[in-house]
Image (cartoon, coloured by chain):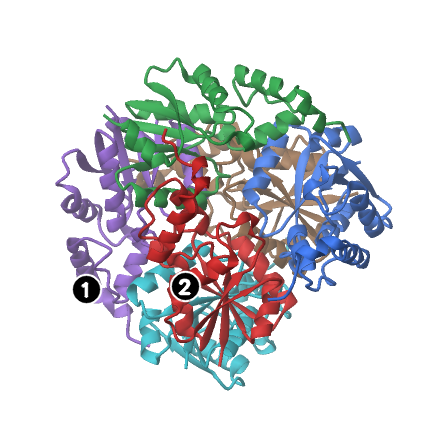
Chain colours: A cyan, B brown, C blue, D red, E purple, F green
Amino acid sequence: MTKAVYPGSFDPVTNGHLDIAVRAASLFDELIVAVYDAPPKHLLFTTDQRVELMRQALGHLPNVKIGFFTGLIVDYAHKVGARAIVRGLRMSSDFEHEFEMALMNKNLAPDVEVVCLMTAVDFQFLSSSLLKEVAQLGGSISNLVPKHVAAALKKKYSLPEESVSRKGG
Amino acid sequence: MTKAVYPGSFDPVTNGHLDIAVRAASLFDELIVAVYDAPPKHLLFTTDQRVELMRQALGHLPNVKIGFFTGLIVDYAHKVGARAIVRGLRMSSDFEHEFEMALMNKNLAPDVEVVCLMTAVDFQFLSSSLLKEVAQLGGSISNLVPKHVAAALKKKYSLPEESVSRKGG
Amino acid sequence: MTKAVYPGSFDPVTNGHLDIAVRAASLFDELIVAVYDAPPKHLLFTTDQRVELMRQALGHLPNVKIGFFTGLIVDYAHKVGARAIVRGLRMSSDFEHEFEMALMNKNLAPDVEVVCLMTAVDFQFLSSSLLKEVAQLGGSISNLVPKHVAAALKKKYSLPEESVSRKGG
Amino acid sequence: MTKAVYPGSFDPVTNGHLDIAVRAASLFDELIVAVYDAPPKHLLFTTDQRVELMRQALGHLPNVKIGFFTGLIVDYAHKVGARAIVRGLRMSSDFEHEFEMALMNKNLAPDVEVVCLMTAVDFQFLSSSLLKEVAQLGGSISNLVPKHVAAALKKKYSLPEESVSRKGG
Amino acid sequence: MTKAVYPGSFDPVTNGHLDIAVRAASLFDELIVAVYDAPPKHLLFTTDQRVELMRQALGHLPNVKIGFFTGLIVDYAHKVGARAIVRGLRMSSDFEHEFEMALMNKNLAPDVEVVCLMTAVDFQFLSSSLLKEVAQLGGSISNLVPKHVAAALKKKYSLPEESVSRKGG
Amino acid sequence: MTKAVYPGSFDPVTNGHLDIAVRAASLFDELIVAVYDAPPKHLLFTTDQRVELMRQALGHLPNVKIGFFTGLIVDYAHKVGARAIVRGLRMSSDFEHEFEMALMNKNLAPDVEVVCLMTAVDFQFLSSSLLKEVAQLGGSISNLVPKHVAAALKKKYSLPEESVSRKGG
C-alpha cells in the first residue's frame, strides 16, 4: 500500500490544485493533502481557513485526508508513513527550484520519492498568487476556483483592506 | 484603426522601454503608454514623476499618449478602447511569468491581445531594477537612459538616503 | 496602414496556427500568411498542398491573403510591403531560438518588426511535428486540426508509407 | 492496485534509467519497463538486445516486467492495464517537450497519468546519447552503466565501425 | 599574472562555494574571495562572521585571500587589480540574471571578465538560502557545509529566535 | 602557468568566437584554439580550411596557437597540458547541454576545468549555423564575420550548390 502526501500553502486552493489532488488520489492508496502551517504574515487565509476550504473541496473523496504541517515535509512524510510527495507542475513552474528542493529532500530522506504530475492544460496559467491579484483587482475568477473559494475570496477583499485596491485608471 | 497600450512601472523609463515604445508606435495607429499607479513603497519615483519622465522622453511622437492606471490592465485597455497590450521581451525576461499573465488576461478579456516585441540587442541586459542598483552604487548609466532620467536618478541618490550606499570596499 | 506577414512551414496547418492567424488579422490591416517553400525532403505536404490547406481554412477572412516564399523572410516582407512579422509563441517554444532569429532579422532589416502573439491555452501542446507523429500512430487528432486537414493527414498516412508505422505492441 | 509503465528507447540502459525504474517499482504494485521498438536506423542496439540488457539489469525485481511496444504509448498503457506512465526527469531534460507530450497524451487518453520522478544527483549529466558518444571516443563509462552494458558497448565499438572513431588529436 | 575575485554573500559559505573557490584558485595566480558587506537585515551572519567562516575554510590555501566589499564589484575588481570575476553556476542558477549582470558589468568595465565555473554534481542542489531553511527546520546538513559552519548554524538557530520555527506537524 | 584550450567546430569562425578567444587569451598564459576534426558531411568547410580561417583571424596574437583534435576534448587537453577548457556562452545557448557536457567531462577528467565566458552583447544572436543560413540566402553578414571569412562564405555559396537556394518568393 502506498500512501502519498500532497503539500502546499493552498492560499487558497484553486481548480489546478484540485485537478492534481484528484489525479494523485487515483494513483495512490491514500492521499494526505497537507496544508503548510506557515506564519500568517504573507498569507491571505489562516491555516484553519485553508484546511477548511480544502475540506469542502475534497472531503467527498474516500481515500483523501486533509492535514497540516510545519517543519520539513520529509519529516511529515515519515510521521504519517507516506512514501511519496506529490508536486503539481505547470509549464510556468520554476523547474530548477523544484529540482533543487527534490534533490535536497532526497539528501534528507532517501526513502521518500518526489512524484510530479503535470497540471491540466486549462489551469496552466493559474497560480494562487496570480489568482489573488486578479480577485483583489475585481477580475472574474469564477472558472478558476470552486464556488466556496470564490465566496471566501470575495469576503476577504470586501473588508476595509479593499480600500487600497482598484479605484479605476 | 488599432489602438494599443504599453503598460509598465517605468521606475524609471530606460532606453529599452523607449526602444519598444517607438517601435510599437510605428505599428499601431495610436499608442498609450500607461504608467502603473502602484503604491509607492517599492518604487523610487512617484506616479507623477514617472509619467513626467515618460512625457519628456516620448512627448514628441504624434501618435503616443501618456496615461496611468490602477486595477487590471485589461480593464484599462477596455476603458481606452485598446485592442492590444504591448510587452517588451528581453532574453532575460521571465517568459513563463509573461505567459501566465497573458493567458490570465486572455481568460479575463478574450478580445484584447498581448503583443510582444523583442528588445534591441543593446538593451538586452537593461532592467529598471538593475539600472537603479548600478546608479545607486555610483556606476555610469549615461548610455542606458535619456539625459533627463539620468539627472533625476542622480538627484534621487544624492539625497540623505545615499548615506546607506557605497562607501568603498 | 500596417501590413503583416505570418510565415511558417504549416506542414500542415493546425488549430494553433489558425488561432494566431485570426488574432493577427484582427490587429493589422492586412495579413499575408506565407508558406515557406522549402525543399520537400523533410516535409509531409508539398508547398501547393500546404497553401491549399491554408486557403481552405482562412480563405473566408477578407483581410487575409495566402502566399509562399523562399529565401529570407525579411526580404519577403520588404517585397510585399509588410512592416511586421508575426510569430506564434507557445510555452514550449524555444524562446532562445526565437530571440536569435528576431535579433538576426533586426540586424538584416531594422525597419521590420517581429511581433509575437501567445498561442491560446488549448493549443499550447500542439506542434505540427507532434501532430504528425500522433496521426501516423493512429491517435485521434480531430480536436487539433480543421476537418479538411484531418482528412488530408488520413489520406497521407493510409498510402503505402503507412507500412512503416504502427503494428501494435 | 496501480500498474505503471516506464517507456523509453534505452539504447542502452544506463544507471540513471535503473535508478528511476527501481524507485518507480517501489511506488507502484507492478512496473512494466517498455522498450520502444523503433526502426533501428538511429539506434545502436536492436530491440531484442535492448530488452535483454534491461532484463539482466532488472530481472531480479519481483514486481518488474520487461516488454516492448510500438505505436502510441497511451495505447500500450491501455493494452497492459497501466494507469501511470513513468518519466525520469533530469535538470537537463527538455521540460517543455516533456510537457508537450504529457498534455498530448492527456488529450489522447485522459485516464492515464504521466508521473515524473527526478533522476538522482549522480546521474544528472547522464544521457544515453552522451554515454554512447563518450564510449565511442574511448572514455571511461564504468561508473555510468552496469557491467554487462559496458561490455556490450565495448563489443559494439570494437567492431569495424570503430574505424570512424578516435584516432587521437 | 592573473588575479581573480570571487564575490558573494556567503551567508554562510557552503561546500559548493568551497568547491568553486578551490578550483578557481588552481586556475589563477591569486584569488580574492570577496564577501559582500551588505546591510544585515536580510542576512543571518554579520560581515565579520561571514569573513571569519570563510577564512577558517580557505585560510590554508596559499594563493587565496579573503576580503569584503561594498559598492560595484567591478569597482572592487579595479581596486584590487583583478581582471576576472569568478561565478559558480549551478543548473538551477538563474542564467538570465547571471547574463544580465555580466553584460551590465561589461558595460561598466570592459576590461574585467566574468568567468563562470560549474558547480560539482554533488552540490547542484545546494544554495545558501535552501541550506538555511533546512538547518532552521532541523534537517541534517552535515554533508553540505564544513564542520565549523554547521556549528555556527546550530548556534544561530538555537537562540531565542528558534521559537518561531519547527514545532512538528 | 595556466594553459587553456578553446574547442569548437568553427564552421566558420565568427566575430563572436573571436571575441571569446581574444578575451580568453588575456586571462590565460597560453590559449590553444582547437578546431574539431569532425567527419565533413555536416560541415561546410574542411578541417584545413577552418584552421586556416582561424589562423588568419588570430595569428597575430602572441599567446594563441591554432590546433585541431578528434576524440574527447579532455584527452586533447591532457595531451597539450591544458588545465582549462573555454566555452563561450550566449543567452541562447543550451545551458542544460553545456552543463551535461561539463559534468561528464568532470567525470572523465577531474583535473580539467570548464571555464565559461559570456559572449558580448553584439554577438548574442550569432551562431555559425544561423550565419550560414543567412549567408546562403543572400543576407548581409559583413558585421558578423571577418572579411576573409565573408569572402570564403561567398565563394562557397556561389558554387553550383547555390542552385538550391534563394530564388525569391
3D distance between C-alphas at marks 1 and 2? 41 Å
Location of the N terminus of chain A by quadrant is: bottom left
Q: Residue B43: where, in percent of width, then height?
A: 47, 47
Task: Tell me the residue at 22%/46% (across/down).
Answer: E47
Towards the viewer: F162 or B106: F162
Decide: few, some or many residues near mark 2? Use Cα within 10 Å; few <14, some 14-19, many ≥20: many
Task: Tell me the residue at 22%/35% (across/down).
Answer: E26
Towards the viewer: A141 or B62: A141
Q: Quadrant of residue C158?
A: bottom right
From this viewpoint, is residue D16 visible? yes
Subunit bearing disc 2 = D
Reply above or below: D46 against B169: below
Residue type at mark 1 is Leu
Assign a secondary structure to mark 1: loop
Q: Residue F115: where, in percent of width, then height?
A: 34, 35
Assign a secondary structure to mark 2: helix
Q: In the image, is E154 to the left or to the right of E109?
A: left
Residue type at mark 2 is Ile
Q: Residue C124: where, in percent of width, then height?
A: 63, 56
Q: Which mark is residue E159?
A: 1
Subunit bearing disc 1 = E
Q: Which mark is residue E99?
A: none
Residue with the most extreme top position: F60
Residue with the most extreme front position: D160
Q: In the image, is F81 to the left or to the right of A97?
A: left
Q: Which mark is residue D20?
A: 2
Reply above or below: B22 against B98: above
Q: Quadrant of residue F144?
A: top right
Q: In the image, is B115 to the left or to the right of E15?
A: right
Q: In the image, is F42 to the left or to the right of D31?
A: right
